Amino acid sequence: MAYKRISPIPVIEGASGLQSSPAYFPIVGGTSSTSSFQNPSSLGTSGQVLTSNGSSSLPTFEAPSSGGSWVLISDQTVSATSSIQFTSIGSYDIYFLIFRGCGNNTNTSTSGIQVSDDNGSSYITTNYQGGLDRNGYDNTPPGNDNSTTLFPISGPTTNTNNYTSLKIMLSGLNQGSGIPVTISGNVTYKNSSGGGPKMVIGRVGGRSSTAGGTLNAFRYLASSGTVNGNFRLYGIAN
């Protein structure tokens, strides 16, 4: 007479020890090296990730942490505007501003960034320590633009096929009263002076005033004329 086994084959005999497992559920180890395998208590929902709860508890499906991820705050494509404002930007440890295909419509126009402590109702125009170190693509002419009224982003540009590319990091926004905003980044633009026009590569850096309340907004503006292009602002939380 043949022997028919009706109980699950145990782990010690090379199986799972389970009679069945719900559809699509992951299977995890048992409470000991020979205990039957287990399923998490829930399959979770779309977008959740399987998260460890330590060495003596079943993992669970939970929403992924937002720390370290890039969050798109603002995506603005503008044409013939004097400035681009970034207000109501939330609270992130670091912000990244990326320009694509931007230009000034006035020859010799420069551009920069100013911060605000009243969400863009007004902008601070004093006590900046901003600088732009620049070199032509052929290493000449090197130069420096510095300012106490804003963070300089580009030197004099030409309005003929002027495409400014910028990747800049800002920290200190929405971090409390008396905390300055600092910036650093890289810019490429077409220069209209010093033997130009020629492509210029620049390094941007600086620190804002600590006067007033919490710095919570900023704007990009041209010294004359208008600007156009696409501007994207991202926030990153720890």
Image: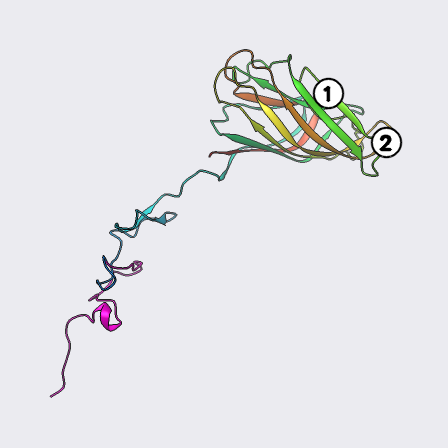
Tell me the residue that label 2 is attached to: 196
Say which of 13 and 140 sits in front. 13
Q: Residue at x 60, y 14 (%)?
A: 124
Circle 2 or circle 1, nearest the eye: 1
Q: Residue at x 63, y 30 (%)?
A: 184
Point out the residue furthest to the left here: 1
Q: Secondary structure at mark 1?
A: strand
Amino acid at the residue labelled 1: Asn
> Where in the figure is residue 92, as x and y percent of width and height?
48, 29
Tell me the residue that label 1 is attached to: 146
Packing grade of label 1 (10 A; few <14, some 14-19, many >=20) is some
> Where in the figure is residue 209, as x and y percent of width and height?
60, 15
Residue 99 is drawn in which quadrant?
top right
Q: Secondary structure at mark 2?
A: loop
49 left or right of 23?
A: right
Residue 34 is drawn in which quadrant?
bottom left
State whether residue 25 is above or below residue 172: below
Magenta residues? 1-30
Residue 150 is drawn in which quadrant?
top right
State whether residue 98 is above or below residue 155: below
| On-image quarter of the N terminus | bottom left
Amino acid at the residue labelled 2: Gly
Point out the residue furthest to the right here: 195
Color encoding of the figure? rainbow
101 left or right of 15?
A: right
Indicate which disc residue 167 carries: none
228 left or right of 39?
A: right
**Residue 28 is covered by the magenta coloring:** yes
Please tell me whether the stretch drawn in magenta is mainly helix, strand or loop. Answer: loop
Task: Indicate which disc, 2 or 1, sits on the residue closer to the N terminus.
Answer: 1
